[in-house]
Image (spheres, rainbow, N blue to C red):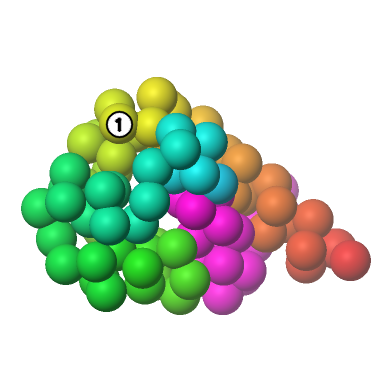
Amino acid sequence: MDTPTATAFRAAFCAVTREARLATGWTQEQMATALGIPVARYGKYETRSPMPHEMLPRFAQITRQKVDHMFAVATARALHRRAA
């Protein structure tokens, strides 16, 4: 079974995080407040550093996503990126 590179997975997971937030109609500021973190830190989770595991359940609840689905989508995208 193929595995994505760490870099490709991080980029894909950040994109999935951003898309999930946008689908809720929330701003980065609203999400940061709901998660109890600074806006600048939350912004990094959408651009360069995947969200810490301990925040994922709350984020998933807010965005009505399943954490395992987020990982699956990110993995599939990273593998596709690697194959391209």
Give residue 73's position: percent from left, percent from top. Answer: 61, 41
* Residue hosting label 1: 62
Relative horizontal placement of residue 22, taking residue 8 as reference (left or right) = left
Front residue (pair 22, 45): 22
> What residue appears at the point 69 percent right and 46 percent down from the top-left corner?
76
Region in magenta? 1-18
Would you place residue 10 above or below residue 65 in this image? below
> What residue appears at the point 51 percent right and 66 percent down from the top-left corner?
10
Front residue (pair 75, 50): 50
Relative horizontal placement of residue 40, taking residue 76 as reference (left or right) = left
Give residue 81's position: percent from left, percent from top. Answer: 78, 63
Can residue 13 be seen from the camera position used here? no
Query: How many numbered markers are drawn?
Result: 1
Q: Is residue 14 magenta?
A: yes
Q: Please, what secondary structure does the residue beneath circle 1 have?
A: helix
Q: Is residue 77 magenta?
A: no
Where on the picture, by quarter, is residue 42? bottom left
Q: Main secondary structure of the magenta part?
A: helix
Can residue 78 be seen from the camera position used here? yes
Give residue 53's position: percent from left, percent from top. Answer: 25, 50
